[in-house]
Every structure is written in structure tokens, then in C-alpha cells.
């Protein structure tokens, strides 16, 4: 495929340069002032990419951000200090170069000759896209879009670049491109006679013996000769100054250098009790004690400079060409290795260095002075003495830093003596800060922090400090490496801050309740329903309810009543937000198990009866919400406490969608009534613990129900205590907290707790005990991971005292 030019335009500039990025520094305002593209607030300069020039070539100037396509005159925009890159239909041409007066295709490819393959390949491609070599002065006009056969990448260094294009895009020959380049570039050759160096501006030449480089016709190239013995130019220019050659044809220039002088060593030895330095001109010597340098033969001038407190006494003992005396400069006509001695004498008066010790809280330590590497007491020293002061704290203190104009920080104090100097070393005992959050107090041993109730600080000797917290609701320590709620033992070496946190216990419920049910609602509040408020066996069950708000730590009675009075019933939060209440008793004496159920609606705070009943009456049973939205009900009894309970080993499912109850065929491994506990584990199974089994025996056994297979399996391990009327709560760490309960037939309620690990299927006694023994209470997981324990009773079956108190368990 052949491309024809869509137009041509004569370049309006001083000269046309093929394959040249010519940068014309002019205003961007008016006429043909600049190329297309983005323009920042500053007025840009205008440059030209020319090969008769090129219209439609992409450019990007950075950091100014000017970019776009060259216009009909081949012009683009840049700002001083920019670098510029060019691209052909998005494919880069060479590397980024400095935007300046002239940038050639040789520059972007870091080439010095028009015969460089990359330069020739670029010329072939541009001439092909222009339909051939344009007439002098006419522009290469690129199409707006790349031809279909244009490659995805351009590698101008590829060996077969001119044959690598797809069919339909055949490049002009290398000969055509080379002829085109030769017509517009000239070669500048430089020959050096003698030892020296020649460089060029624009860059391209940087040569020793002989070198050459190609430049566009019309370019003014400035040559600079460096090196000893340069005598002048010949050929393209003459004289000994800079050589400026305006190239319009191949040109040769010779730079002539005479023989370079040889070198010889100069050695200076400094003596005397004073100090100073010796330097040379030309530069080469800058001496300490003894120094030597190799310098070019010729006149070398040495200069001696005495340090503060010293005097230069003169030159002596010269050898070779050095025969200097006196105290002035020493001029040496250097032709052979030479030595000379410089004598400095001391004339300084000692000045004092005073080291003080300070402490704001009873700390202490010592300071030692090390002048010029020796250890002596701090005192008077000659100027220019190098001082190192070291602070060492005593066993109960820390060194906290220097107060001085010559040093700071906690390292050594290093300085050079120039005048009388005072330095203070600060030693302090470490400070212990106690922050008390909540209503409580903290005291320390040793004495220092005494009954602290807010924020307190005190200094202590380095060592062990023991903090003790007093007050209700202490939840633990933060900082100092202390954990838990016991005494905080701190090894105090640095300033340390420790926080003691106290949380107020919950207030009492609106009424004492035992045998009630509690459940956390979707809004985080706790619904507490039913139970009894008296220990009398004939006391009726309650039909009242109340809400606990963890955010305000308050209980509020509900005005709406349950559809049936209930105790020893269950409360389960359903996926839709309602609460299912099932079974229970209507009183605490001869009260048969109840097979009725009802729903609590949080939005209206009302209770509604469910028309369908459970498959059997149940009281003191368990209920657990399954992942599929159904409710698992198991165990319980159907007679009151004074008769022999008929303990169930049966189970059933409640379906919220149909509000119906369906019996489960499988039976539990043991009958369980009188308040066992059940918990849904993270693996989907249900843990059932304790309760009262056959023959009124309180159980310490447990089993698992698998909703997938609807089967029960006994757990080998047993609880650490027999329990009925206890509660089991799944913690955020996956373990199950089992609290309170007891053996109603032979003992009082328990204040102990234990933890079940589902991974190992084992029970472990908890180290902490409850604030009050509790049975038939409720335990509810709060959003922050703590567990709220409410109500219950703290006596035996014959002396049952109903509680209205609450407490919080913190894992």
C-alpha cells in the first residue's frame, strides 16, 4: 500500500533541517505561535520537529505537561527545563531529550552518525508515510490515524526493521533514506595533536585523539579545547579561543597541544606544640600531621594557617626545590620531589569546662570528661581540645539528657573547646502514670500513688512497683505488661503509663424474677419475660415483661402483657425479628407443663398467641434457633415440682413460616427436664447440657444434636459440676460459657461457671466466680462480647430467694 501526501506547506523559518527537532523559543500568542495540545498557565516556548517539517507527530513535554500533535509547520510547545518525547501514532521515537535550541534524530537515539541504523530506519518510515522524499521546504503530512498495517510496537534497532512491516506497508529503501540524510547533514571531524580533549556544543563530540560527529546543515557548533599546552586551532577555524563552525559541508579541525609538564611530590611535615593546617596552590595539599601530594611541575605555593590558640612559627628543613624560610607563603619552583617543615607553637590560655548534675525528682548519677581521648576530671583545657562527656546514672535513675549549647540528647556530649563551657547532665527516676477509667481507685507499693481515682503520676526508684485496684466492676489493666484483674506488678525502668478500667454493674430489674426467659433483640436490647417473683411454691407465674438497654444500662417495664403467664418457658429470636415464647408453667406448684406458644412483636411491643400447640406439653425445656430458621425444642417436663416429673427425651421443630410444630423421630440419649441448657455451636450442631434425668437425678452429662441427620450423640466428657437451672451462652471465641444452676434436690444454687470447648469436646472450670449464686436465671450475649446475667434465685429449692440483680461476665 502506498500513501500519498494530502498537502504540503513551505516551512516559514530560517532554515529547514531534516530529521531535526528544532526548538524555537518564541511566544505562544498569535498566528503560528505553537503546536496543538495542552497549555499551562505559563507562556510556552515553541519548537519544531522537522524533516521538511512533520505535521501530526505526537509529542509530550514534561514536567510542564504540554502535549499534542505538531501543527502544519511541525511546531510543538514546551517550557524551559522540559524534556520532550515524540511518538508516531502512540509508539515512542527514541528516548526523552532536553528541550533546547536543536534536538536531532541522532540525539533521541544517542547516535553521532547519520549512518546509525536507528536513524536510517526512522527516516525510511517517515518518508514512506509521506509517500516519498518531499521537495525541499515541503512538509511531511501524517494521516490522522495509523494505517491498518501499522505495527503495535516500533523497534528501530531491530536488524530487519525495514522488512518487518505487514504486507501493504513497504518502506522506501535504505539508499533513499541515506541520500536524503546526506543532503541535509555534514560531518565535523576533529584531530588532536598532543594530549588534550575537545568537546562540542551541541553535544556530540567529546574526544581524545581523533573523532567525528554528524550535525544538521546550518548548525553552529562550538568546540572547546581543554588540557595543558593548548596552542590553537587549524583547519575549520584558527586562534586559541572557542572554535565556532557553521556546518554546510563536511569540515575538519585540528587542535594542537604542546608537551604536558611532568609531576613531582611535595611533602610537608608539621612540628611544634601548636596546631594548624597547610594548603597548596594549585590545589592538592590540605594537611593534617604529615601529608604528601603529587603535583604538576611548575610553581607551587604553600600557605600555613595556625589554629585558634596557636601561631605559625615558620618554614624550615627544605629539600629538593624547597628552600623556604620565614612565616609567609612558601613558593617552590617544582621540578623534583621536595620536602619542607612547618612549625606551629602554642599560645593559647586554658578555658574551663564545667559539668553539673541536675534532677527534678531525686535521681542522680556521675559525669566523666574525656579530653583528646584521656579520662580526667572536668576542669580547664586548651582551646581546640576535643571533649567527650559521658553521663552514668545511679541504680535507681535514668539519664534523661543534656542541657547545654554544645550538645543535646541522651548520648555522649561531644564538642571542641573554644571558650568557657557549662554542661548539665539531667538524671531522673522513672515516672509511673496511672489513669483510672470509671469509678474505682488504684494504690501503689512502694507508696507513691495513693487511692488514685483519675490520673496520677509519681516518680519511683527503678525496680518493681505493685499496683492494686479497689472498687466494683474492675475489668483489668492496660499497659506495663499487666493483664487480668489481679495486682499489676510493673518492672519500672522507663516512664510508664497504665490504665485501670472499672465498669459499673447493671442496675436491678424492675421486678425480681426466677424461671424467666431472656433474649437479645435485633436492636441490641434484651427482652425479659415471665418467671416468678416469689419463692412461695404456690406463687403464680408472671405475664409481665421488661427490656434492658445495654447502651443506657437501664431496665424498662413493658405495658403490654403476655398472652399467658409463664415460668420455666423459652424465648427464641426468629429471623423476622419476632420472639417465640413456648411452654412453661403457670405457677410453681402442681403446674403442668404448657403446650401453648406466642409471639412478641418488637415494633409494637405486643404479644400474640399462636393457634397451633407443641406436640407435648413442656416446661423447663430448651429451645434453639437453627440456621434454616426453624426452632429446635427438646426435653422438659409436663407436671409440677411436687409430683414426680415426667421428664421428656423427645424433641420437635417449630416452623415460623407455617407456625406449626413437628415431632422429631430420634430421641435424646437421656431424658432431660428441670432446666437443661442448649446452645447452637459454630459447626451447626446443638450442645445440650445437664438438667434433671430419670429418677430425679441432676445430670453432669451432655450430648450433641445434629440438625442435618436429626440424631443425638452423647459427649464422653462430663461437666465439672452437676447442673440444672443453669445457662449456656456461645461466646465470640467459639467456646460456651455455662453459669450457675445447681442440684435442686440436695443443694443451693451455684456461683461457679465452666467453659466447653467444641474443638476438644471438653469442659474446664472457669477461674472467676459469679458475683452471686444464681439458678433459673438468664444469660445473654451482648454485642461487645460480654454476657449479661439477670435474676434467678440464690438459695436451695426450700429457701429460694428470687433476685432482681444483674452482673456481666467479661471473657
Image: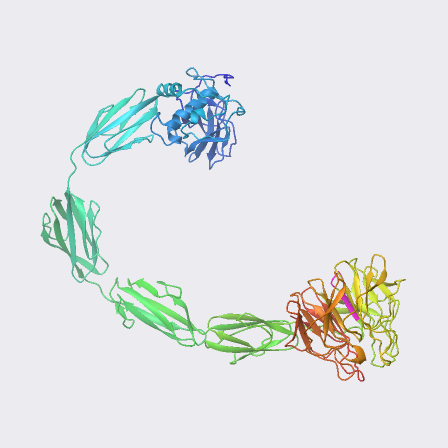
| Residue at point 69%, 62% (across, down) | 683
In this view, the residue farthest toward the top is 135
Q: Is residue 309 left or right of residue 723?
A: left
Position of 23 relative to 275 (above/below): above
As for residue 522 lying within the magenta part, the answer is: yes
Colour scheme of the picture: rainbow
Q: Is residue 579 visible?
A: yes
Position of 126 relative to 565 (above/below): above
Q: Position of residue 177 (x, y in %)?
A: 39, 20
Q: Is residue 299 left or right of residue 516?
A: left
Occupied quadrant, residue 624 = bottom right
Q: Position of residue 221 (x, y in %)?
A: 31, 27
Q: Position of residue 264 (x, y in %)?
A: 14, 45
Pick the quarter of the image with the C terminus. Answer: bottom right
| Residue at point 26%, 62% (across, down) | 384
Q: How many marks?
A: 0
Specify the segment rendered in magenta.
517-524
Position of 224 relative to 786 (above/below): above
As for residue 142 lying within the magenta part, the answer is: no
Q: Nearer the viewer, residue 714 or 157?
A: 714
| Residue at point 9%, 49% (across, down) | 320
Position of 592 relative to 657 (above/below): below
Q: Position of residue 613 (x, y in %)?
A: 88, 65
Q: Is residue 73 visible?
A: no
Q: Nearer the viewer, residue 759 or 464?
A: 759
Q: Is residue 69 left or right of residue 242?
A: right
Q: Is residue 302 left or right of residue 802?
A: left
Amino acid at each position: 500500500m502506498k500513501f500519498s501526501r494530502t498537502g504540503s506547506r513551505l516551512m516559514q523559518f530560517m532554515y529547514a533541517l531534516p530529521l531535526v527537532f528544532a526548538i524555537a523559543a518564541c511566544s505562544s500568542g498569535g498566528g503560528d505561535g505553537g503546536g496543538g495540545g495542552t497549555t499551562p498557565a505559563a507562556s510556552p516556548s515553541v519548537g519544531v520537529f522537522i524533516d521538511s517539517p512533520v505535521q501530526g507527530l505526537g509529542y509530550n513535554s514534561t514536567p510542564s505537561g504540554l502535549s499534542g500533535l505538531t501543527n502544519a509547520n511541525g511546531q510543538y510547545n514546551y517550557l524551559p527545563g522540559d524534556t520532550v518525547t515524540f511518538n508516531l501514532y502512540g509508539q515512542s521515537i527514541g528516548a526523552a531529550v532536553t528541550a533546547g535550541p536543536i534536538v536531532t534524530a541522532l540525539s533521541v537515539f544517542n547516535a553521532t552518525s547519520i549512518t546509525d541504523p536507528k536513524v536510517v530506519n526512522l527516516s525510511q518510515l517517515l518518508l514512506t508515510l509521506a509517500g516519498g522524499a518531499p521537495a525541499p521546504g515541503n512538509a511531511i503530512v501524517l494521516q490522522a490515524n495509523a494505517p491498518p498495517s501499522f505495527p503495535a510496537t516500533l523497534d528501530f534497532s531491530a536488524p530487519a526493521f525495514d522488512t518487518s512491516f505487514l504486507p501493504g506497508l513497504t518502506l522506501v529503501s535504505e539508499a533513499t533514506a541515506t541520500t536524503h540524510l546526506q543532503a541535509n547533514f555534514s560531518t565535523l571531524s576533529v584531530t588532536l595533536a598532543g594530549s588534550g580533549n575537545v568537546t562540542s556544543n551541541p553535544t556530540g563530540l567529546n574526544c581524545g585523539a581523533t573523532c567525528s560527529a554528524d550535525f544538521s546543515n546550518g548548525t553552529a557548533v562550538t568546540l572547546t579545547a581543554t588540557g595543558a599546552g593548548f596552542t590553537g586551532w587549524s583547519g575549520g577555524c584558527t586562534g586559541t579561543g572557542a572554535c565556532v563552525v557553521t556546518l554546510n559541508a563536511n569540515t575538519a579541525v585540528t587542535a594542537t597541544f604542546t608537551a604536558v609538564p611532568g609531576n613531582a611530590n611535595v611533602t610537608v611535615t608539621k612540628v611544634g606544640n601548636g596546631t594548624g593546617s597547610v594548603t597548596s596552590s594549585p590545589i592538592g595539599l590540605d594537611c593534617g600531621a604529615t601529608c604528601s601530594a603529587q603535583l604538576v611541575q611548575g610553581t607551587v605555593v604553600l600557605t600555613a594557617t595556625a589554629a585558634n590558640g596557636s601561631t605559625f612559627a615558620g618554614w624550615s628543613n627544605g629539600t629538593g626545590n624547597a628552600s623556604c624560610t620565614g612565616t609567609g607563603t612558601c613558593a617552590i619552583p617544582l621540578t623534583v620531589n621536595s620536602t619542607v617543615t612547618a612549625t606551629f607553637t602554642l599560645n593559647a590560655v586554658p578555658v574551663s569546662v564545667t559539668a553539673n548534675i541536675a534532677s527534678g525528682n531525686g535521681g542522680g548519677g556521675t559525669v566523666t570528661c574525656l579530653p583528646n581521648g584521656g579520662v580526667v576530671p572536668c576542669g580547664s583545657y586548651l582551646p581546640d581540645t576535643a571533649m567527650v562527656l559521658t553521663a552514668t546514672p545511679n541504680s535507681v535513675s535514668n539519664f534523661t539528657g543534656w542541657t547545654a549549647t554544645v550538645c543535646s540528647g541522651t548520648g555522649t556530649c561531644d564538642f571542641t573547646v573554644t571558650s568557657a563551657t557549662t554542661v548539665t547532665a539531667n538524671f531522673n527516676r522513672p515516672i509511673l502514670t496511672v489513669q483510672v477509667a470509671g469509678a474505682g481507685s488504684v494504690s501503689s507499693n512502694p507508696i507513691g500513688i495513693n487511692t488514685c481515682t483519675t490520673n496520677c503520676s509519681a516518680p519511683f526508684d527503678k525496680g518493681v512497683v505493685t499496683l492494686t485496684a479497689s472498687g466494683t466492676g474492675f475489668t483489668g489493666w492496660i499497659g506495663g505488661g499487666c493483664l487480668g484483674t489481679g495486682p499489676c506488678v510493673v518492672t519500672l525502668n522507663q516512664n510508664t503509663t497504665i490504665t485501670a478500667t472499672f465498669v459499673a454493674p447493671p442496675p436491678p430489674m424492675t421486678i425480681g424474677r426466677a424461671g424467666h426467659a431472656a433474649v437479645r433483640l435485633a436492636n441490641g436490647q434484651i427482652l425479659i419475660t415471665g418467671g416468678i417473683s416469689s419463692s412461695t411454691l404456690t406463687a403464680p407465674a408472671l405475664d409481665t415483661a421488661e427490656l434492658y438497654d445495654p447502651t443506657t444500662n437501664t431496665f424498662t417495664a413493658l405495658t403490654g402483657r403476655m398472652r399467658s403467664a409463664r415460668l420455666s418457658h423459652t424465648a427464641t429470636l426468629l429471623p423476622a425479628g419476632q420472639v417465640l415464647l413456648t411452654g412453661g408453667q403457670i405457677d410453681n406448684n402442681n403446674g403442668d407443663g404448657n403446650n401453648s406458644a406466642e409471639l412478641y412483636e418488637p415494633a409494637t411491643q405486643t404479644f400474640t398467641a399462636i393457634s397451633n400447640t407443641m406436640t407435648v406439653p413442656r416446661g423447663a425445656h430448651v429451645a434453639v434457633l437453627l440456621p434454616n430458621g426453624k426452632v429446635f425444642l427438646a426435653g422438659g417436663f409436663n407436671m409440677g415440682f411436687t409430683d414426680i416429673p415426667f421428664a421428656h427425651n423427645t424433641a420437635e421443630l417449630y416452623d415460623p413460616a407455617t407456625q406449626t410444630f413437628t415431632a422429631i423421630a430420634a430421641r435424646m440419649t437421656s431424658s432431660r427436664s428441670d432446666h437443661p441448657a442448649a446452645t447452637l455451636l459454630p459447626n451447626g450442631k446443638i450442645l445440650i447440657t445437664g438438667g434433671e434425668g430419670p429418677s430425679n437425678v441432676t445430670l453432669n452429662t451432655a450430648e450433641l444434636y445434629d440438625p442435618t441427620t436429626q440424631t443425638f450423640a452423647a459427649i464422653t466428657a462430663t461437666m465439672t459440676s452437676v447442673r440444672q437451672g443453669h445457662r449456656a451462652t456461645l461466646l465470640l471465641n467459639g467456646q460456651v460459657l455455662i453459669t450457675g444452676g445447681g442440684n435442686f434436690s440436695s443443694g443451693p444454687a451455684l456461683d461457679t461457671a465452666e467453659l466447653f470447648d467444641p474443638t476438644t469436646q471438653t469442659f474446664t472450670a472457669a477461674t472467676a466466680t459469679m458475683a452471686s449464686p444464681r439458678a433459673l436465671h438468664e444469660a445473654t450475649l451482648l454485642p461487645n462480647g460480654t454476657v449479661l446475667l439477670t435474676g434467678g434465685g440464690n438459695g436451695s429449692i426450700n429457701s429460694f430467694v428470687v433476685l432482681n440483680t444483674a452482673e456481666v461476665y467479661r471473657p
